[in-house]
Amino acid sequence: MKKTWSLVAAYFRHNLMAAMEYRSAFLLQALGMALNNVIFLFFWWVLFTRLPSIRGWTMSMVATIFGLVALSFGLANVVFGNCMRVASIVVTGDLDYYLALPADPLLHLIVSRTQFSSWGDAISGLGVYLFLVPGSLPRLPLFLLYAVLGALIFTSFAVIVGSLAFFVSQSQDLSGYLYNAMISFSLYPIDIFPNVVRLILYTVIPAAMVGTLPARLLFDFRWEGFAALVGFTAVILLAARGVFALGLRRYESGNRVTVRG
């Protein structure tokens, strides 16, 4: 466990230092993503100027969902920046590089890169919650905890859909569609969808587990809901490792020799 955290911390420092070498590009990407998030939230604000609530959800509650999802997504792609590239890494044979090293190949793969623009997601998500949600400060520790759990769910789901490349040829597009669906649906209150869709969003594409459920728990904490969230996070983490490990048994080397300094 200590070696695992040391590896994650070392790569985080390395990726951050690399980002700081290109400060202008880093800041532009982060600001661009933050601006994109503000524009998305603006349309919700316009809608709520005409409607007091939607299926019981108010503007502050929707802003909480948005803040949670943005921060969770940002953390996932800042710390585990390669999680969305698992499929392409498998297909191109770049996985050989990670298999040749003594470290855990899955962990090494996903932490070896960061997404600069995701800093904008993380910062804007935290800012939206603090500035647009009344009474947010006392609940901030829980908000941060739920965001960390959401980041682990995002990362695990990305690994699972990316690992489809072990079993289905040319699955990069399918993996991308599934992950984008996860992001898109997580930004909306689940109550606006039909019952069948709600079931899918709690299980197959667990968008509700990073948006709606933790947002509800912030406004109305229930131990059973909290246990469900923590339990689901543990299950999907184990599922991601299991699917990736199963895929490795089917993996055929790309016969690529990669030198990295």
Image (spheres, rainbow, N blue to C red):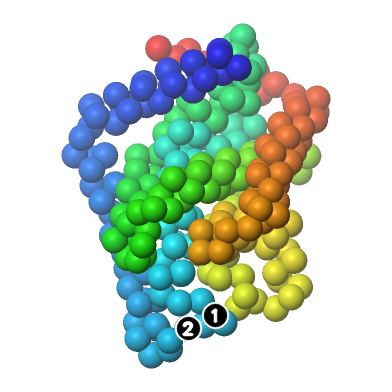
Asked whether the beta carbons under mark 2 and mark 1 sit within 8 Å of each other, the answer is yes
Amino acid type for the residue under numbered disc 2: Ser
In the picture as drawn, the residue positioned furthest to the top comes out as 102
Q: Is residue 123 visible?
A: yes
Q: Classify mark 1: helix, strand or loop.
A: loop
Which residue is rendered at x = 75% and y = 27% of the image? 245
Q: Quarter holding the N terminus?
A: top right
* Image spot of residue 94 (x, y percent): 58, 25
Q: The C terminus lies in which quarter of the figure?
A: top left
Residue 157 showing in the rendered view: no
Residue 101, given in percent of the width and then of the height, sits at: 59, 11
Q: Residue at the location (45% across, 30% down)?
A: 113
Question: Which residue is labeled 1 in the image?
Answer: 56
Q: Residue at x 62, y 75 (%)?
A: 191
Question: Is 96 in front, or is 140?
Answer: 140
Q: Residues within 10 Å of mark 2 (few under 14, many from 20)?
A: some
